[in-house]
Image (cartoon, rainbow, N blue to C red):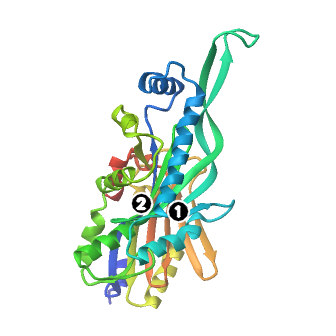
């Protein structure tokens, strides 16, 4: 009598209610490309703003204007301003404000967080043409890590739901942006009338799996670019429309992108049995020949730190992590009902993809 090896597809057949791929958390950097070296700072102050002397006091003036604009923006909108304490989880502090705005069916800025953080900013130096401190004063600029104020605008967006935009109050005003792909998909599904059941940060069930997958696929770099433009027009910013017209504005790159696949089973015992078997069979998934299959990249030389697989346990929760350069594949049980695979990309170069936002779609291929 012939025997047949039972494969993964045989185990999954008849037990999977939903199999969905979607961008999850997306964390972006914003920087002004032509304000990155000292000479560009001087050109910004003299050629663009028209000041005869590129004094560091001018940067302080711009920063004061921005901080005043944030204070007035919060007062006019009745928006709480929260100063983060050291070690606080910012999202947990802001969650009640976000949930309160969402329950009211409103969009806008829920609260503004203020934190002192190390940022790479320009510092100005004043020196004189002679050793005695006399003569014509001259100014120089250099980048340095300084502990400075940053403003976190926690908001509820029309398309993305909860998100935040962080703006540094010091020149050249680096920006961070955080959005959630699953929250985007939930709002888009409701708008199209596709019914679904939530599973924390994800989906548990839907009567239209194909329609829901199509919605997840509509999250593109263009959609995120529209999100940025929407909030550039609403928030107080250190750069002005005149600055933008002269070419001084933020470009966006990918800092961290999570791409997820969620397989929802019809019974918890099925998903737990599957995951336990998967952990047992894949403890060596960090080997080079395995990682180049997962990431689609030929491994010619071992990355710094080598390859590794870690099985993390916290109570009854187990997470299987396989690391590849700066990125990793994380597998775990979600809410006891689903098997979640998350590819956490901390450097798009690990996959041969450029960092600029317009290359986002290449990460989901």
Q: CA distance from mark 1 to mark 2?
A: 10 Å
Label 2 crowd (10 A; few <14 / some 14-19 / many >=20)? some
Name the residue furthest right: 132
Residue 258 left/right relative to 215: right
Say which of 33 and 243 sits in front. Answer: 243
In percent of the image, x 58 and y 79: which residue is there?
317
Label annotation for residue 294: 2
What secondary structure is found at the residue carrying circle 2? helix
Q: Does 133 appear above or below 39?
A: above
Q: How many numbered markers are drawn?
A: 2
Label 1 crowd (10 A; few <14 / some 14-19 / many >=20)? many
Q: Does 14 appear above or below 216?
A: below
Q: Does 148 appear above or below 337?
A: above
* Quarter of the image with the N terminus in it: bottom left
Residue 315 left/right relative to 363: right
Image quadrant where residue 234 sits = bottom left
Image quadrant where residue 339 sits = bottom left
What secondary structure is found at the residue carrying circle 1? strand
In percent of the image, x 43 and y 31: which residue is there?
34
- Give the x, y percent position of residue 346: 49, 53
* Quarter of the image with the C terminus in it: bottom left
Q: Which residue is labeled 1 in the image?
A: 322
- Give the x, y percent position of residue 233: 36, 50
Q: Is residue 237 visible?
A: yes
In percent of the image, x 33 and y 34: which residue is there?
245
For the residues bearing labels 1 and 2, Cβ distance under 8 angstroms: yes
Image quadrant where residue 214 sits = bottom left
In percent of the image, x 60 and y 30: which residue is there?
57
Say which of 297 and 259 sits in front. Answer: 259
- Counting residues from the start of the chain, the first of labels 1 and 2 encountered is 2
């Amino acid at each position: 009598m012939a025997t047949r090896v039972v494969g993964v597809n045989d185990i999954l057949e008849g037990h999977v209610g939903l199999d969905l791929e979607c961008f999850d958390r997306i964390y972006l950097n914003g920087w002004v490309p032509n304000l990155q070296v000292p000479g560009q700072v001087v050109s910004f102050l003299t050629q663009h703003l028209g000041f005869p002397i590129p004094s560091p006091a001018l940067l302080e003036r711009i920063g004061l204007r921005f901080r005043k604009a944030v204070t007035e923006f919060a007062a006019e909108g009745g928006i709480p301003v929260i100063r983060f304490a050291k070690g606080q989880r910012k999202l947990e502090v802001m969650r009640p404000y976000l949930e309160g705005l969402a329950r009211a069916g409103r969009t806008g800025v829920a609260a503004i967080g203020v934190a002192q953080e190390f940022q790479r900013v320009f510092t100005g130096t004043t020196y004189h043409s002679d050793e005695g401190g006399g003569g014509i004063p001259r100014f120089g600029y250099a980048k340095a890590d300084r502990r400075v104020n940053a403003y976190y605008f926690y908001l509820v967006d029309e398309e993305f739901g909860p998100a935040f935009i962080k703006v540094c109050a010091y020149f050249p005003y680096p920006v961070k942006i955080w959005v959630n792909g699953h929250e985007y998909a939930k709002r888009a599904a409701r708008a199209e009338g596709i019914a679904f059941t939530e599973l924390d940060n994800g989906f548990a069930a839907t009567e239209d799996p194909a329609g829901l997958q199509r919605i997840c696929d509509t999250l593109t770099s263009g959609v995120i670019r529209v999100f940025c433009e929407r909030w550039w027009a609403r928030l107080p910013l250190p750069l002005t429309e005149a600055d933008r017209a002269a070419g001084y504005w933020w470009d966006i790159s990918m800092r961290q992108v999570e791409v997820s696949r969620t397989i929802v089973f019809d019974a918890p015992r099925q998903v737990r049995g599957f995951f336990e078997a998967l952990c047992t069979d894949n403890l060596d998934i960090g080997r080079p020949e395995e990682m180049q299959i997962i990431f689609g990249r030929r491994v010619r030389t071992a990355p710094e730190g080598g390859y590794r697989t870690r099985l993390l346990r916290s109570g009854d929760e187990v997470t299987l992590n396989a690391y590849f350069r700066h990125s990793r594949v994380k597998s775990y049980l979600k809410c006891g009902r689903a098997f979640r695979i998350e590819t956490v990309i901390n450097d798009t170069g690990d996959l041969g993809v450029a960092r600029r936002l317009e290359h986002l779609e290449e990460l989901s291929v």
